[in-house]
Image: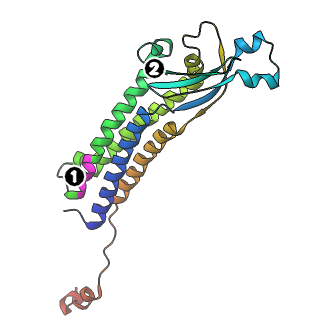
Amino acid sequence: MPGCFKKTLFALASLVSFVSFILIVVAMGTPKWMTGKILCKTGADLVNATDPELVKFIGEIYYGLFQGGKIRQCGLGGRRSKFTIFPHMVKKLNTGLHVMIIMFLCVAIFFSLVSFGFCILNAIKVPYRAIKGPAGVGLWNFLAGGFIVLAVTSFMAAVKLHQLTERIANFRENAFQFVILEEEFEDCFWVCVASATAHAVNLLLVAISGINFPKIKTKTEEANVTAEDIMY
């Protein structure tokens, strides 16, 4: 049986793994990874709008991995609309990269659950195989955190290098062209970053569990020293 200290560490690590699993699932299902302001360039050019008048042509957009919405401002008031990334819009994006982000997160979910199970196992007993022990827990957390980092990095690349927001804003816009004035990573993106950080914390807990702290002798143990012990 593991000691009380190790039990506590692995129980805490199992909780962190489960929280990470919940965070990834929530982040994937929420359409608030990015928000931004979009300018209806076509409408602004038609009326030759000056700076004070540009406010009438500035709308908003938000989106996640599967869905989103926008407010079109083309001079005649705001028009709200919602959209889904699959199955049609994804063809106009960098399809491979977008699917890869989702796959990375799905793999991270799997390894988070594996980490959760192995942490529970190590909190209950000492496994006889190394892969089921602290080394295995460290491996699963490293893989889970690594895949989350890959997903987050890939999403940033899609936004900054492949103009993801602009492509989404202009999807099926035949009459108007939109340009991005500003864009910002939202809560769900940072939730994924927090999930990766949680697995880094677990790696630290696993490392601490491997430290053999010296046992403190009690006064009773010191008093039980015999004459033979002194001679040796």
At a point 60% along the width and 19% down the height, the residue shown is: 166
Residue 125 on image: x %, y %: 19, 57
Residue farthest toward the front in the current orientation of the protein: 76
Left/right placement of residue 89 relative to residue 124 reads right
Question: Which comes before the other along the chain, label 1 or label 2?
Answer: 2
Given the image, on which type of amino acid does mark 2 rest?
Answer: Ile
User: Which stretch appears magenta?
Assistant: 117-123
Label disc, if present, on residue 121 of the rendered structure: 1
At a point 29% along the width and 81% down the height, the residue shown is: 217
Residue farthest toward the top in the current orientation of the protein: 174
Mark 2, secondary structure of its residue:
loop
At a point 17% along the width and 52% down the height, the residue shown is: 128
Residue 9 on image: x %, y %: 33, 59
Given the image, on which type of amino acid does mark 1 rest?
Answer: Leu
Mark 1, secondary structure of its residue:
helix
Left/right placement of residue 119 relative to residue 199 reads left
Residue 138 in the magenta stretch? The answer is no
Where the C terminus falls, by quadrant? bottom left
Residue 61 on image: x %, y %: 59, 26
Question: Residue tagged by mark 2?
Answer: 85
Label disc, if present, on residue 143 of the rendered structure: none
